[in-house]
Image (cartoon, rainbow, N blue to C red):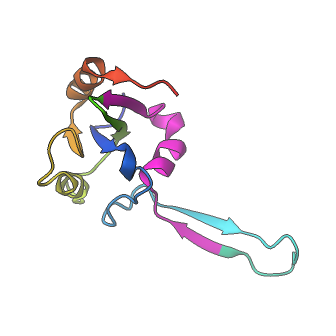
Amino acid sequence: MIGNVFISVPQADIYNELPASITSYDWVETVYDAENPEAEPTTVNHHPTWDSLGERNKAAYGEVIVVTVGEDVFHVYELTASWKEGEVSALLALGAGLAAPSYTLMTAEEARSFISENAPVYQ
């Protein structure tokens, strides 16, 4: 585990984008026109969904862990989030007013317990 926080995201929300203030996971892609090689390439800026974040960061953080809590399914993402840049505050705000474990921010130890106490979903 190399991230400093973990967050449990409801399965229904994995295609939602991360908060706009979290830009450390954004990436830029250069797109070339195969039919017109002389055309200037286009630059496309990407802001990730939770799902694309998990896919892009598999090498750094490993697979996203999926667990069931009762009838609900949650994806547990490992992140490196900055207190100084306001990223942790943005993540905390996602869970404001919601019952745990929806958008619950956890330490590594808390995430291990959460995962072991709930049934992992194997994909």
Which residue ends up furthest to the bottom in the rendered image? 39
Work out which quarter of the rendered image holds the N terminus and state it: top left
Residue found 87% across the figure and 75% down from its top: 37
Q: Residue 66's quadrant in the figure?
A: top left
Q: Please, is residue 81 above or below residue 29 in the view?
A: above
Residue 42: image quadrant is bottom right
Determine the residue positioned at 16% across, 40% down.
Answer: 100
Given residues 57 and 16, the one toward you in this image is 16
* Picture coordinates of residue 65, whole percent (x, y): 40, 30
Q: Residue at x 36, y 58 (%)?
A: 18
Residue extending farthest to the front is 71
Residue 10 placement (x, y as % from top left): 32, 44
Most foreground residue, 52 or 66: 66
**Is residue 33 found left or right of 99 in the rendered image?**
right
- In the image, taking residue 58 as reference, residue 1 lies left or right, namely left
Q: Nearer the viewer, residue 57 or 10?
A: 10
Outermost residue toward the left in this view: 97
At 40% from the left and 58% from the top, the residue drawn is 16
The magenta region covers: 43-68
Q: Percent position (x, y) of residue 96?
A: 13, 54
Q: Would you say residue 32 sits in the magenta stretch?
A: no
How many numbered marks does the figure carry? 0
Q: Quadrant of residue 114?
A: top left
Residue 55 within the magenta-colored segment of the rendering: yes
**Relative to 102, residue 67 above or below:** above
Q: Residue furthest top?
A: 116
